[in-house]
Image (cartoon, rainbow, N blue to C red):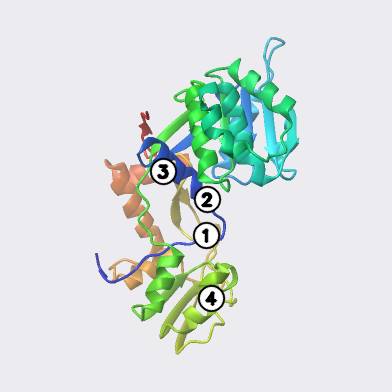
Amino acid sequence: AKFPKALWAEYEPIVDEPPVAAAAATFGRNVKPLYRFAKAKRILSLDADFFHAESGSLYYAREFAKGRRVVSKNDEMNRLYVAESHLTLTGSMADHRLRLATSHMLALAAAIAGIIEPSTKSVLATYAQGADLNPKWVEECAKDLLAHRGECVIVAGAHLPVEAHVIVHGLNWALGNIGKTVDYVEIEKPSAASLGDLASAIKDGSVKTLVVLGGNPAYNAPADLDWLKLQASVPEVIRYGYYVDETSLVKTETTTQIAAAHYLESWGDARTADGTVVPVQPMILPLFDGLTELEVLARILGEPTTDPYTLVYQTVTALAGGDAEQAFRRFLHDGLLEGSAYPIATVK
């Protein structure tokens, strides 16, 4: 609103968009899955290292551990099936582990779907062609999942194609897991432009000032964008980051480097996998007089207040309502803002 001609773009060198895109394609809504591993007696992971590499991994690891905790002689532990292309933390805990190339994960999902929902076998047959699968492993895994309808969960790695995620959504639905071991939460529709959109704008000559907040696109942007040449063509570049790195060293007409404060030197807030707002509190004052992202953005916008603590205080108290001081103290004490999680969605 302040700068209507400005373009806000976001980029991560690791692709994690397929799960959200697949959920939107499957249900026609902006939702994402949340897995309740503590409630699942049978778990199938398709190249998903949910202990370490997936979004919300710390929460998922703790939830999984609850299903492994034995208090009495009658308690049963969960059973974990893992198909993965290399050994991961999740795979090291598997009861049944299948070594399989990532390129064959879609075929595995299709093969399991053909057993659980035989009516889909002919439709998904093309996905299963040419894959080197262990038919005995596939059959036993599918049978175990069928024997635990509503008490199992299937999860696919974020890097897998959209088709694999759509099949997994369908399997969780067919097995009656939705609302039991899998919940879907409403999320905001992504509004940021992509790095490709930004590249196109630079090529068109419409970008006169480029502000790079963290990241290192000169090092890890897709090669076909030729980012070094693109960035060098922008008249003014303002680089905010921890280091003088590849992006900082690109020669332009005017380049300004702003030293970034480490997040452990900064006030801020963040959202967990389920949307709960949590605080980021500094452990020390900035060692090298760096600025936080909040300070940089507030100054660009001409905000009357640029102090990060005040900005976080204003944001949290506005969300919490009621007594501002008490709400903020509770936020810091509890480490989260109650009631800030994404709402659970009813999907069809």
Q: Is residue 140 above or below residue 7?
A: above
| 4 or 3: tag closer to the N-terminus | 4
Q: Which mark is residue 20?
A: none
Residue 47 screen position, x and y as percent: 65, 41
Q: Nearer the viewer, residue 204 or 208?
A: 204
Number of other residues with Cα within 10 Å of mark 3, as a class: few under 14, some 14 to 19, many 20 or more? many
Structural distance between the alpha carbons of marks 2 and 4: 22 Å
| 3 or 1: tag closer to the N-terminus | 1
Q: Which residue is mark 1?
A: 12
Q: Nearer the viewer, residue 229 or 79?
A: 229
Structural distance between the alpha carbons of marks 4 and 3: 44 Å
Residue 7 screen position, x and y as percent: 34, 68
Structural distance between the alpha carbons of marks 2 and 1: 9 Å
Amino acid type for the residue under numbered disc 4: Asp
Structural distance between the alpha carbons of marks 1 and 4: 16 Å
The answer to whether residue 132 of the structure is visible from this angle is yes
Amino acid type for the residue under numbered disc 2: Asp
Residue at 70% over, 21% down: 140
Q: Is residue 58 above or below residue 118?
A: below
Residue at 74% over, 31% down: 134
Q: Is residue 209 above or below residue 36?
A: below
Amino acid type for the residue under numbered disc 3: Phe
Q: Which residue is mark 4?
A: 226
- The answer to whether the residues at label 2 and label 1 have Cβ atoms under 8 Å apart is yes
Number of other residues with Cα within 10 Å of mark 1, as a class: few under 14, some 14 to 19, many 20 or more? few
Q: Which residue is mark 2?
A: 16
Q: Which residue is mark 3?
A: 331
Looking at the image, the residue that sits furthest to the top is: 74
Is label 2 or label 3 in front?
Answer: 2
